[in-house]
Amino acid sequence: MGYKDYTTDYSEKMSAKTSKYDALICKAEMLHRDNKNEVSKKEASYYLEAARVCEEIASMNIGQRAVANKWNARKEDCMEKIDSIMAIIEPPKKKPAAVKSESGSDEELNERAVSKNENSGGVKVTSSGFKTKNSCQEVTAETIEKWYAEKPNHGFDSISGMEKERKLLNKIVEDNDWKEIDSFINYKSVNSILFYGISGCGKTFVIEAFIKELMDKGYKYIRLKGSDIHSSYVGVGQKVIDIAFKEAMDNEPCVFFIDEFDEVCVDRNIENVAEYSKQATITFLQSYDSLLQHKEKNVIFLCATNYPASIDAAMRSRIYPVYVPLPDAKARTSYFEKKLENITLSGMDYVYIAKRTAECSYRDLDKIISFLIGGFREQAIEKSKVLSESGELDKQATQNAAIAAIKDGKIKLDKELFESVMNDYSVEDKYDSFESLKAFRRDLAKENDNYEYEDIESLEAPDDGAFKKDEAAKPKPTVTPVKTGGVSKVKPMLKPAKS
């Protein structure tokens, strides 16, 4: 297995960002043509946005030197386009002063005054990233207001399985009712949690259930994604982190959740990490330390990632890890019962369905259910056809007849349809993702003799024994495969030993 952990989540992000880059370049070229080859600030703004996308893609591939270099080269091409456009629109009136680049070397940089749109203020761009002329103005009150999220509509009662994790989260909720005595006796309750697991395992659902329980007790809810922060200009992204922590502390009690956390606090020791990513990590650690220093502030920090080994070691040692496994048989049974609650089964029961879907994530389950219901719908309509006097299909009467037959259990979802769907559907291969997490946990156990960890096999679906493939066909990796690069040894994510 290579350094990059090939996952659907990664592929989707790469595809989306590549498409965005292509669209921006196309817009710039079409605008140039429509303006009869005359340059404009609007054209430059498209190249600026495209350069930023290149920077994001390069950051996603910092462990893949060739890919990262390709996108960094494309970024530089965009920057040269901006230079040539601005040299025509706003020729420099004087030689600019020497400035310090992000990499630490002195360079003579031409000031590139580029408008984000025709009416916006100027933007300064350097060869190593982007900075706004007045970046503090980018984080507006309107932007901050959007960080506050609505209360999730499901709590712990909606979670099936994960008994140990639910018990832990329930205890954290209950502990927050005892802040005064905790402060008096210096009891350190858990107030920072990292949820990790493979893509599609239900991390967000579990986190939202936890947040719902906290909001029922009066907590406010701030939510950000790693992409929200890195879609800003570099300087602004760092200000977002700092302001978000201050906002949470100023509006306690508050729960602050960052998704895609590996993009916010990336390990600075990974090869080819972009300079602005390192700065974002430093800013995050400083802001987080500020929260720790204000122990009187009732703020719970939550984060989630599919790639725990990509998180900076300084943060991994300060946060409590909660592994979110694949749904077990009990969870899958409950999930199918809920999704198919209006449909009668024939030739099988939900326990059978759960056994047949042992290797599935919630993403897999949703796709299977979608195919099942689609096939069942076609069968129900076909069996309930009502024709009008003219011989045409009476759609309303057919629908009414189908619904009545389904309610009465006369039309059932049979085993034959289910097996047909299962035979046609290819369950997403999760072996590599599991091996990555297992290698990560093994490294933690080796480095921390004073700490206890859950059995490494618990990374598999708890009751299924899935993914135990032939070792000869699938050798164990010699390095820990993570999204942003291979690391043979990771710093500890500490978990207190059982007393």
Image (cartoon, grey):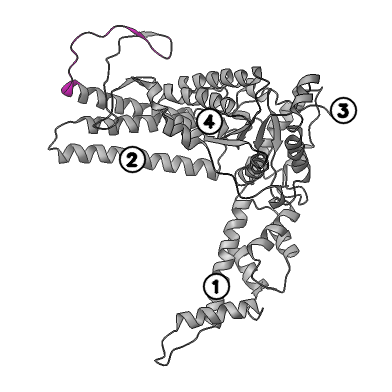
Crowding near the residue tagged with mark 4, few <14, some 14–19, many ≥20 C-alpha atoms within 10 Å:
many
Disc sitting over residue 63 in the figure: none
Q: Which of the two discs, 1 and 4, labels the residue nearer the N terminus?
A: 4
Q: Is residue 157 left or right of residue 23?
A: right
**Looking at the image, residue 244 lies above or below residue 407:** above
The earlier-in-sequence mark between 3 and 1 is: 1
Q: Amino acid at mark 2?
A: Asp
Q: Residue at x 63, y 36 (%)?
A: 219
Give left or right: position of 498 versus 340.
Answer: right
Look at mark 4 in the image and give the residue it sits on: 263
Tag 3 near tag 4, CB within 8 Å: no
Q: CA distance from mark 2 to mark 1?
A: 39 Å
Q: Is residue 253 above or below residue 469?
A: above
Measured in 3D between alpha carbons, the distance from the residue under mark 4 to the one under mark 2, in whole angstroms, is 23 Å
Element on which disc 2 rests: helix
Query: Which mark, by number, is residue 499?
Result: 3
Q: Residues within 10 Å of mark 3 (few under 14, many from 20)?
A: few
Disc 4 vs disc 2: Cβ atoms closer than 8 Å?
no
State which mark lies toward you, 3 or 2: 3
Amino acid at pointer 1: Arg
Q: Earlier in the sequence, mark 3 or mark 2?
A: 2
Q: Are marks 3 and 2 in contact (CB under 8 Å)?
A: no
Q: CA distance from mark 3 to mark 4?
A: 35 Å
Give the mark nearest the N terminus, 4 or 2.
2
Residue position marked by numbered label 1 in the rendering:
377
| SS type, badge 4 | helix
Magenta stretch: residue 94 in it?
yes
Query: Mark 3: which amino acid?
Result: Ser
Q: Are marks 2 and 1 in contact (CB under 8 Å)?
A: no
Residue picked out by circle 2: 22
